[in-house]
Image (cartoon, rainbow, N blue to C red):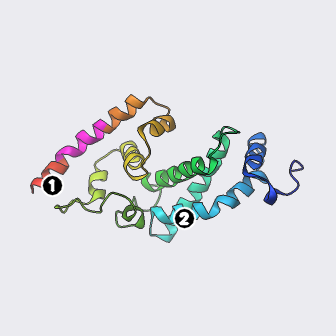
Amino acid sequence: MGILLSMGDSSLDDLIAVAQANPTDDGGAMNEIVRRFDPLAQRIGRSVSARPEVQDDAAQEARIGLMDAVRKHSLGTPGFPAYARKYMRGAALRYVTSGRSEVAVDPHDEFWTGSDVAPAMPGTDVEVHELVAILTPEQQRLTVARYIANDTVTEIARSLNVSVPAVSQRLATIHRALRPVVTAAVAA
């Protein structure tokens, strides 16, 4: 690739521009971007599971999320690292919650301990994974995006390519599905 003399000295914006201009190029700019963001990919992999084999796969999914972020990023828009982090974390979370990993999200993993979600509902024996298990895979992904990754309803709507009211309606459906289980657990 003759566009940049030294990828290591290039700005991130320059690398993104080159990667977007050459989407079929498997090397060069995209490899340099992935190399620069690899420590973040590894941290994200560790944050979603305590199991090393799942961590490695989740980190790889985070790298794929990074490549998607590069392809979709609007050149000249500031804040790419934060933008990429959301794509990376979302890809890793989708992998863990999709069932493609050997286990679904384990509420005892460090992923949960760093969030506002406790492994068990206070005052009950009901664990979070039992609640999430009654939801469909799509509802699980939406729940993780909203309540674990703390994505806004607007961000979720944009990522799903649906309206904000549609996301709000889906969240209301999830709440209705969980209400009887939570009510029964608290009453017990």
Query: What number of labels is visible?
Result: 2
Residue extending furthest toward the left: 188
What residue is shown with label 1?
A: 185
Does the magenta stretch mainly form a helix, a strand or a loop?
A: helix
Q: Quadrant of the C terminus?
A: bottom left
- Amino acid type, residue under disc 2 in the picture: Arg
Residue 141: image tag? none
- Is 127 inside the magenta-drawn segment? no
Q: Is residue 148 above or below residue 51?
A: above
Image position, residue 12 (x, y; %): 72, 51
Secondary structure at numbered mark 1: helix
Q: Is residue 97 above or below residue 174?
A: below
Image position, residue 140 (x, y; %): 37, 47
What residue is shown with label 2?
A: 43
Q: Nearer the viewer, residue 108 or 113?
A: 113
Image position, residue 104 (x, y; %): 39, 58
The part of the chain drawn in magenta is 172-180
- Amino acid type, residue under disc 1 in the picture: Ala
Secondary structure at numbered mark 2: helix
Distance from disc 2 to disc 1, alpha carbons, whole Å, reads 35 Å
Say which residue appears at 31% left-offset and 57% top-offset: 129
Say which residue appears at 85% left-offset and 57% top-offset: 6
Q: Earlier in the sequence, mark 2 or mark 1?
A: 2
Say which residue appears at 39% left-offset and 66% top-offset: 109
User: Going by the image, does 142 lie left or right of 128?
Assistant: right
User: Going by the image, does 29 lie left or right of 152?
Assistant: right
- Observer-side mark, 2 or 1, equals 2
